[in-house]
Image (cartoon, grey):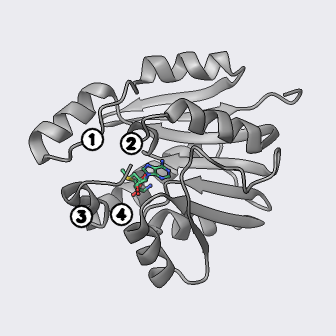
Amino acid sequence: MKLSTPEFRAMQSLPRKLGQRFFEMPVFRHMGLDLQNKDVLEIGCGSGYGADLLNQLNPKSYIGLDVMEEQIELARVKYPQFEFLLQDATDLSQFSTTSKDVVIIFGVLHHIPDWRKAIDEIVRVLKPGGSLFLEEPRGVDIKAFDFLFRWGHPDTDFGLKVLDEHLAKRGLTIARKQWSPLLTMYHIKKRNDQ
Ligand SMILES: C[S@@+](CC[C@H](N)C(=O)[O-])C[C@H]1O[C@@H](n2cnc3c(N)ncnc32)[C@H](O)[C@@H]1O
């Protein structure tokens, strides 16, 4: 779903960029993020700052997608060298099955009412043995942000417990999981025989 105006503004802010560059990326790197010669898909790429950071890791290919027109327009203006698509993550039909080595999500699933469908699509497009790097806030943090900053997140059943249950149901393995204030970060693997 589209972001509220306050959250959209916060996503363009300097603190958001500093967090992504100096905390989230190093933690993902520590958890095994390696994009050298990999086919990479970023879900909910926003205005493209993540694309800039991820492309410094020399992927073979990179595509960022987001459902919000305003975000994709900004991304295309700021980073014309990268490929961005206006696309809902619950429909990845334009990507072939087993075509991506790595899918990466910086805080997006809690915005998608049918987040299970997005996960199922990601599992389909990942190559056997491929990786999903994912970070999401806990339900309690989402409520705190809505209370303090009026971000107005959509009312979904998303939470880390149901996320873990769905990952297990889809036969995915949580290779690494790290809790930090505001975000829990995952390195999730698709089995080689999947
Ligand atoms: C909290 S923002 C994070 C943006 C960026 N990843 C970052 O870390 O700054 C969530 C992003 O997910 C996008 N989004 C929400 N629902 C989506 C969906 N169904 N498919 C793709 N993107 C979606 C929003 O438009 C927004 O850009």
Instruction: Identify whether 80 is placed above or below 55.
Output: below
Q: Quadrant of residue 141?
A: top left
Residue under label 1, please give it: 153
Q: Is mark 4 within 8 Å of ligand 1?
A: no
Contact? badges 2 and 1 (CB < 8 Å) = yes
Quadrant placement of the C terminus: top right
Asked if residue 157 lies left or right of residue 170, the reply is left
Camera-side residue of 87 and 31:
87
Instruction: Identify whether 61 is placed above or below 144.
Output: below
Residue under label 2, please give it: 111
Circle 2 crowding by C-alpha within 10 Å: few under 14, some 14–19, many from 20: some
- Disc 3 versus disc 1: distance between alpha carbons? 14 Å
Closer to us: mark 3 or mark 2? 2
Asked if residue 97 lies left or right of residue 147, the reply is right
- Disc 4 versus disc 2: distance between alpha carbons? 19 Å
Residue under label 3, please give it: 9
On the image, the x and y values in percent for residue 156 come to 36, 30
Judged from this view, the residue extending furthest toward the right is 193
- Disc 3 versus disc 2: distance between alpha carbons? 16 Å
Judged from this view, the residue extending furthest toward the left is 148
Q: Amino acid at mark 3?
A: Arg
